[in-house]
Image: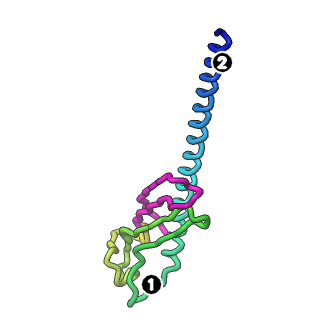
Amino acid sequence: MTALLILILVSFLLMLILKASSVGIKHVADSYLKEDAQLFMQSSIENSIMAIEGYERNDSSKCLKHIHFKSSDGRFESNTTILRYYCYDMDKCPNCDIAVQIKTDKSQGNTLMQTVVYTTNSPRNGDKKLRFSKVTLQKP
């Protein structure tokens, strides 16, 4: 009888240890996915700045408003929306309906952008759904 009681107690303790380790493993995996998404967001912001710098501006083209990126492993996607272009000289922002004239040339070319990163249905993500959003003021 005593041996059976000790066996039940030991099995209960082992189940508690397994439950605690599975919670720990899930927490580490979730933290990794979150950090990876935030790094992809920073990369998307920097790539958006490069896309703005490389965008051909002329009298007939509109300004760049939306930029979409996918991660190379297919785990994340990002959508960057340019909310405002800040222009000291409005001649440098032709045909841009989201350009705002500013009073100092020190902020010429600043852009206000919103970047949204979300997980895809990649097998590496499991069924975890993450969505991060960041609004930044950048100077290309």
Q: Nearer the viewer, residue 136 or 76?
A: 76
> Which residue is tagged 1?
57
Name the colouring of the figure.
Answer: rainbow
Does 70 lie within the magenta span? no
What secondary structure is found at the residue carrying circle 1? loop
User: Which residue is depicted at the point 42% across and 77% down?
Assistant: 64
Local crowd size for mark 2, using a 10 Å CA cut-off: few (<14), some (14–19), many (≥20): few
The part of the chain drawn in magenta is 111-140
Q: Compute the Cα span from label 1 to label 2.
A: 76 Å
Residue in the image at 38% along x and 83% along y? 62
Q: From the viewer's side, name the closer residue of 119 and 85.
A: 119
- Per the image, the residue denoted by label 2 is 7
- Asked which secondary structure carries label 2, the reply is helix
Label of residue 71 in the image: none
> On the rendered structure, is 68 left or right of 18?
left
| Residue 102: image location, x then y, percent | 34, 70
The answer to whether residue 133 is magenta is yes
Q: Residue at x 42, y 71 (%)?
A: 108
Classify 10 Å Cα crowding around label 1: few (below 14), some (14-19), many (20 and above): some
Position of 2 relative to 80 (above/below): above
N-terminal-most mark, 1 or 2: 2
Give the residue displayed 40% in from the left and 79% down from the top.
63
Q: Residue furthest right?
A: 3
Amino acid at dot 2: Leu
